[in-house]
Image (cartoon, rainbow, N blue to C red):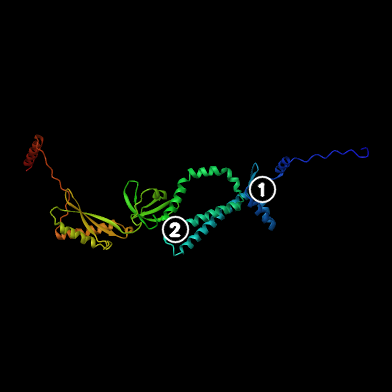
C-alpha cells in the first residue's frame, strides 16, 4: 500500500543461547574450589571492614589454573575446617566410648564391638560433614570413583579385610580380650599369650615374657587358632617324669600324685592323674596330668613347683631318677696295644 511506510530493518538478532552462555562464562571470574571461603569472607567484611580488608589481602594471593582459583585464604579455610572436623570427631568418639562403658549390662566383648561400630559411624559422619562445609560437590568426584574403587581394591584390600575380620571376631566371640591363645614366633617356637586388645588392623597378644605379638585380624579368622579359654579357662597340662627300672612303681605313682596335689593352683576336681607313657632307654616314663583354671598366670611355674616337690619326695623315699648312661667298647688292635705299651713304659720311666 502507498500510505504505509516501508518496514524498517529489524535490529540485529540477539545472540544464540550458546553464544550467550559463552559470553557469560568469559565475563565470570574464576571459581574458587571452596564455597565456604567466599561466604565467610563476605560475612566478615560486612561486620568489620578492617578484618575484611585483611581477608581480601589474603584472598588476593592466589594461584589460578584455568577456571580454578586457589587463594591463600582458601587454603587457611580448608585447613581450619579439616582440623576442626578431625578434633570434633575425636572428641565425639571419645565421649561415645565413655558412654558405652557405662552400660554395665554389656560384657567386655559387646562393649568393644559397640565402640568400634559407633566410632566408624562418627568418623563417616565427620567425613561427610567436612565435605558439606567445604562445599565440595560429590558429583564432581564421580569421574574418579572408578579409580578410587580400584585403589581400595588393590592397595587397601588387606586394611579393609582386617577391619571387617576384627568386627566379625567380636561378633561371634571366638576371639575376645582376655582369652589365652597359643602363638608361634618366626623361629617356629610355640608359646602362649593373652589377648590385650583387638584393634582395627591387628590383635595384640602379650606372652609371659612380655613379648607383644601383633597378629593381623584376618590371620586369626582364616587360620587355625588354639584358644585355651574359648568356652572354659580350665586347661589340662602335662608334667613328664622318669624313674629307674629298679624303683617301686606303685610308690612312685603315689608320690607323683602327692606332689601334684600339693600345688595350690592345681584343681582338686578334676583330680590329677598319673599315666605310664613308655619304657624308655634309661627310665620308665610317666606323665602327670593336672588341671588349672588360670592359664594367663603361666604354665611353666606350675610344672616347676610339681617337679621341685617331687624331687624331695623321691629323695626321702629312695626313688632314683635315672640319667643316660653309655657303655664304651674298645676293639683291640696292634696300634692300640703299642700305644698302651708306650704309655706303660712312660709311666714306669716317670716313676
Label 1, secondary structure: give it: helix
Considering depth in this image, is 275 or 43 the residue closer to the camera?
275
Q: Residue farthest to the front?
A: 1
Q: Residue farthest to the top?
A: 334
| Position in image of residue 108 (x %, y %) | 42, 60
Q: CA distance from mark 1 to mark 2?
A: 50 Å
| Position in image of residue 52 (x %, y %) | 68, 54
Considering depth in this image, is 173 or 100 the residue closer to the camera?
173
Q: Is residue 141 left or right of residue 336?
A: right
State the residue at coordinates (43%, 51%): 165
Would you say residue 340 is visible in this rendering? yes
Q: Are marks 1 and 2 in contact (CB under 8 Å)?
A: no
Q: Nearer the viewer, mark 1 or mark 2?
A: 2
Q: Is residue 37 above or below residue 349?
A: below
Q: Residues within 10 Å of mark 1 (few under 14, many from 20)?
A: few
- Pointer 2 residue: 112
State the residue at coordinates (24%, 55%): 239
Disc sitting over residue 130 in the figure = none
Q: Residues within 10 Å of mark 2 (few under 14, many from 20)?
A: many
Q: Is residue 145 left or right of residue 228?
A: right
Q: Is residue 160 above or below residue 344?
A: below
Q: Residue farthest to the right?
A: 3
| Position in image of residue 162 (x %, y %) | 44, 49
Q: Is residue 336 left or right of residue 76?
A: left
Label 2, secondary structure: give it: helix
Would you say residue 312 is visible in this rendering? no
- Pointer 1 residue: 60
If you read the primary sequence from the N terminus, does the residue marked by circle 1 or circle 2 appear first? Answer: 1
Amino acid at each position: 500500500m502507498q500510505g504505509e511506510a516501508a518496514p524498517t530493518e529489524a535490529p540485529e538478532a540477539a545472540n544464540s543461547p550458546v553464544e550467550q552462555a559463552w559470553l557469560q562464562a568469559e565475563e565470570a571470574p574464576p571459581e574458587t574450589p571452596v564455597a565456604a571461603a567466599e561466604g565467610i569472607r563476605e560475612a566478615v567484611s560486612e561486620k568489620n571492614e578492617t578484618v575484611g580488608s585483611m581477608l581480601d589481602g589474603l584472598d588476593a594471593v592466589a594461584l589460578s589454573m584455568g577456571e580454578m582459583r586457589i587463594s591463600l585464604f582458601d587454603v587457611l579455610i580448608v585447613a581450619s575446617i579439616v582440623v576442626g572436623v578431625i578434633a570434633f570427631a575425636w572428641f565425639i568418639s571419645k565421649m561415645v566410648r565413655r558412654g558405652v562403658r557405662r552400660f554395665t549390662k554389656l560384657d567386655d566383648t559387646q562393649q568393644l564391638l559397640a565402640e568400634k561400630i559407633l566410632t566408624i559411624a562418627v568418623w563417616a559422619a565427620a567425613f561427610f560433614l567436612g565435605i558439606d562445609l567445604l562445599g565440595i560437590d560429590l558429583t564432581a568426584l564421580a569421574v574418579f570413583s572408578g579409580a578410587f574403587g580400584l585403589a581400595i581394591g588393590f592397595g587397601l584390600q588387606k586394611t579393609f579385610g582386617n577391619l571387617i575380620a576384627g568386627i566379625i571376631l567380636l561378633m561371634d566371640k571366638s576371639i575376645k580380650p582376655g582369652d589365652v591363645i597359643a602363638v608361634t614366633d618366626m623361629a617356629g617356637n610355640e608359646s602362649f599369650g593373652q589377648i590385650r586388645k583387638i584393634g582395627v588392623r591387628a590383635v595384640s597378644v602379650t606372652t609371659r615374657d612380655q613379648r607383644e605379638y601383633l597378629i593381623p585380624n584376618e590371620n586369626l579368622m582364616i587360620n587355625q587358632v588354639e584358644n585355651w579359654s574359648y568356652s572354659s579357662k580350665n586347661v589340662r597340662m602335662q608334667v613328664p617324669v622318669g624313674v629307674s627300672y629298679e624303683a617301686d612303681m606303685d610308690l612312685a605313682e603315689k608320690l607323683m600324685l602327692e606332689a601334684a596335689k600339693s600345688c595350690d593352683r592345681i584343681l582338686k576336681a578334676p583330680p590329677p592323674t598319673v599315666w605310664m607313657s613308655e619304657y624308655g632307654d634309661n627310665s620308665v616314663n610317666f606323665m602327670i596330668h593336672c588341671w588349672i583354671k588360670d592359664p594367663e598366670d603361666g604354665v611353666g611355674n606350675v610344672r616347676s613347683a610339681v617337679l621341685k616337690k617331687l624331687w624331695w619326695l623321691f629323695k626321702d623315699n629312695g626313688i632314683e631318677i635315672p640319667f643316660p648312661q653309655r657303655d664304651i667298647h674298645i676293639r683291640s688292635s696292634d696300634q692300640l696295644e703299642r700305644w698302651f705299651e708306650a704309655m706303660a713304659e712312660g709311666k714306669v720311666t716317670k716313676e
